[in-house]
Amino acid sequence: MTGRGPAVRGGRRACAAAVAAVLLTGCGVGATEPVEAGGPAVFALGARPQDWKMLFFLSPTGRPVPVLRVRDPFTNRVPTPVLLAEAVEDLLAGPSATDRATGLSTALPKVRPGTPRETENGMLGVDLPVPVRNLDDTAVQQLVCTMAYTRDRNGRARVVVTGTDGAREPAGCELAVDLAPTRPTTSPVPEPPPAPSGAG
């Protein structure tokens, strides 16, 4: 994982942009067209991005790609950020039947994680009940990107994955995703209040 960040991050942008529209089909989410070849995948999340969670599964070519999921409306009555635990648990549960029908898969084991946490130095951490030192890099990126984009809409958070054989080196997400809100409707400019009676 070390020394690969910027180069791989740029190399994976085109893949994410190419499949973004496919992954959003039937989700009721708008995806804008990529501005240029190789640009980041762009998702228009509307005025309430907290209503969605972004998980990273593997495309048919085996690369991590973002997939949006609607949060449970009964547990999301108050606008709050997507909980790390919620996102990680959903990720490790694997792709849904609909996801698999579109060719999505996962390299992660189907296990129950420990509660994700934020460390004193600002990094994120998660414990898995399996060995992780030899975990495939794409599997690690699935987990790292899901946690990074849950914590930071720019995906800049670094993540430490710990397993029964110890901890891996801190890693960042190597995939660029633009969480662009939809353009708000322009409101009319309110008229100024009338002057108080008798004002001169």
Image (tube, rainbow, N blue to C red):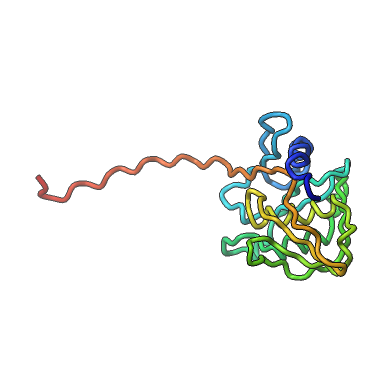
Say which of 65 and 32 sits in front. Answer: 65
Please state, as top left, top right, bottom left or bottom right, where the C terminus lies in the image.
top left
Q: Check the image and name the residue furthest to the top.
A: 36
The residue at the point 18 percent across, 47 percent down is: 195
Q: How many numbered dots are placed on residues in this image?
A: 0
Using residue 19 as the reference point, say whether residue 108 is left or right of it.
right
Quarter occupied by residue 129: bottom right
Q: Position of residue 89 (x, y in %)?
A: 77, 64
Against 171, is 74 above or below?
Answer: below
Q: Position of residue 91 (x, y in %)?
A: 79, 58
The residue at the point 11 percent across, 48 percent down is: 199
Q: Position of residue 23 (x, y in %)?
A: 77, 44
Q: Check the image and name the residue furthest to the front.
A: 3
Quarter occupied by residue 86: bottom right
Using residue 56 as the reference point, say whether residue 200 is left or right of it.
left
Say which of 110 and 162 sits in front. Answer: 162
Using residue 131 as the reference point, say whether residue 179 is left or right of it.
left
The residue at the point 54 percent across, 40 percent down is: 183
Against 90, is 198 above or below?
Answer: above
